[in-house]
Image: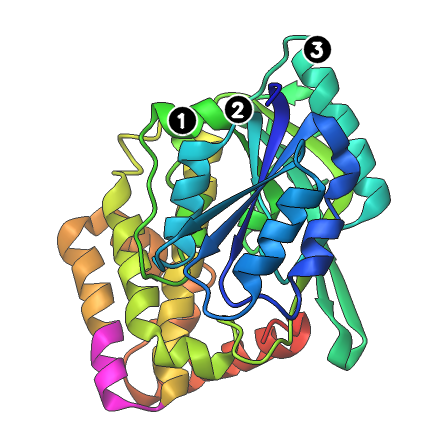
Amino acid sequence: MKEKILTIVIPCYNSEGYMDRAIRSVLAGKDKIEVLIVDDGSTDSTPEKADEYEAKYPNIVRVIHKENGGHGSAINTGIKEAKGTYFKVLDSDDWFEKTSYRKYLETINRLINHQDIVDMVITNFVYEKPSENHRRRMIFTALFPTDEVIGWEDMKRNIKGFSILMHSVTYRTDLLREIGFELPEHTFYVDNLFVYEPFPYVKTLYYLNVDLYRYYIGREGQSITEKTMIERLDQQLYVNYRMIDAFDLFTDVREPHLRAYMLGYLEMITVVSTSLAHVSKDPKNYDKAKKLWQYIRDKDKKLFLHIRFGIFGQAVAKPGAIGRLISITCYRFTQWFMRFN
């Protein structure tokens, strides 16, 4: 297979009902891209459908069948197997917008041809919730200048809540390999690690202001539904703890803009964990939230004070019933405003 400018990894687990839209949305890249379908131990017709795409598009599509290991395991496999200069994850229930995709590929190709191979490309994404005829664009023009090679020091400002999610990023493939990046297996919500742990190693960025990624919300059993997130609170907390342990943000991260961003993102994830514990109305989960905050306090008092008295931290970390009420109220408002689950 010829060297590709981009590998698009599509993790699939029992995705027979919706994977076609994801795969078809990227085939227009033709010989410039590699579509790596990772079948994560599916038990429905996903493996056969994936093989059909490989047979029909042998110069574009490659299929890997593996034992079930979860979303993180599928991405790890993609990192090991990717042949593209850049690396992008597309979940099997999401898709790329056609016009934006064309411009995105043109931009990546130009960066490579001009030898401006940046560590990370950022694009917009769109929340799509057809059940409520709702769509919300997430753009980053307030954070980054557009259409130029920049570093973290060129950030315009940090705005809490403007988060660079997995849907937004494309990494230089070799960067992920050079830092030995690996996600935990059999764990949900690892996308938060995907857009946190590599960031201190990213030195050059490029923000392309196109609405590339369409993030579908509303599929039954989706991992971001409130009921599912509460059931999987321990996995959310596992990811949260790993983020806390990943870096000493005040010594390991020297660039002020990046440090401020990562502090804000860690605060947001900690607030999500706490809010889910409170929304569950389960005393056992209340205790888990308390232990999380105590862990931060014991590990790094400076970090604790920063998160505890941040804009979001203040809203959810107050003790007792009043704190839980405030936390639930803030969560419900955000849920209504963003329509995120």
Q: Residue 149 appears in which quarter of the rendering?
A: top right
Q: Is residue 73 left or right of residue 150?
A: left
Q: Cβ–Cβ below 8 Å for labels 2 and 1?
A: yes
Question: By what rule are the colours in the image chosen?
Answer: rainbow
Q: Cβ–Cβ below 8 Å for labels 1 and 3?
A: no
Q: Is residue 60 left or right of residue 265?
A: right
Q: Disc 3 or 2, which lies upstream in sequence?
A: 3
Write down the residue under mark 1: 201
Using the image as rendered, state which of residue 134 and residue 110 is in the foreground. Answer: 110
Residue 323's place in the image compared with 308, above or below, is below
Q: Is residue 287 left or right of residue 325?
A: left
- The residue lying at 39 percent from left, 63 percent from top is 188
Question: For the C terminus, which image quadrant?
Answer: bottom right
Q: Label 3's element?
A: helix
Write down the residue under mark 3: 113
Q: Which residues are magenta?
A: 281-289
Can residue 232 be seen in the rendering of this structure?
yes
- The residue lying at 33 percent from left, 89 percent from top is 321
Q: Label 1's element?
A: helix
Q: Disc 2 or 1, which lies upstream in sequence?
A: 2
Magenta portion: prevailing SS class: helix
